[in-house]
């Protein structure tokens, strides 16, 4: 893998970790403030999980493509 690919993969992986941390933070906030599950809370948590999955998927794709081309 080139240095650019390594950096790109690292950034995407860290973005996925940040999205999962945000998910956990929102869950803790919702429970601390006693918010009931609703469309609003569902949209936020779903968005964070989709973002994390997209970041991890893109990072895996970069590694797979680099291994395939080498």
Image: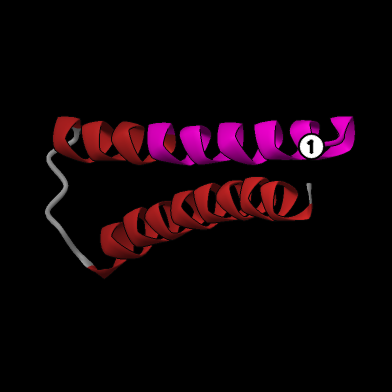
Relative horizontal placement of residue 9, taking residue 20 as reference (left or right): right
Which quadrant of the structure image shows residue 20?
Answer: top left
Q: Secondary structure at mark 1?
A: loop
Residue 34 sits in which quadrant?
Answer: top left
In this view, the residue in front, 37 or 11, is 11
- Residue 57, given in percent of the width and then of the height, sits at 53, 55
At 19% from the left and 35% from the top, the residue drawn is: 33
User: With respect to residue 17, does 51 lie above or below?
Assistant: below
Q: Is residue 35 above or below residue 65?
A: above
The percent position of residue 49, horizontal first and vertical second, equals 38, 53
Mark 1 sits on what residue?
1
- How packed mark 1 is, by other alpha carbons closer than 10 Å (few <14, some 14-19, many 20 or more), is some
Q: Is residue 11 magenta?
A: yes
Judged by its main secondary structure, the magenta piece is helix
Relative placement, left or right, of 15 versus 68 is left
Q: How is the image coloured?
A: secondary structure
| The magenta stretch spans residue 22 | no
Q: Quadrant of the N terminus?
A: top right
Q: How many marks?
A: 1
**Residue for point 67% across, 31% down:** 10
> Magenta region: which residues?
1-21
Which residue appears at 58% of the width and 36% of the height?
Answer: 13
In the depicted view, which residue is nearer to us: 33 or 49? 49
Q: Is residue 46 above or below residue 39?
A: above
In the rendered image, the residue lying farthest to the front is: 70
41 with respect to 68 (left or right): left
Relative side of 70 to 58, left or right: right
Q: Position of residue 30 (x, y in %)?
A: 22, 41
């Amino acid at each position: 893998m080139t240095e650019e690919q390594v950096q790109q993969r690292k950034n995407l992986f860290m973005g996925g970790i940040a999205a999962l941390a945000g998910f956990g933070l929102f869950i803790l906030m919702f429970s601390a403030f006693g918010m009931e599950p609703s469309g609003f809370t569902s949209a936020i948590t779903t968005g964070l999980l989709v973002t994390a999955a997209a970041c991890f998927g893109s990072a895996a794709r970069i590694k797979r493509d680099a291994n395939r081309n080498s």
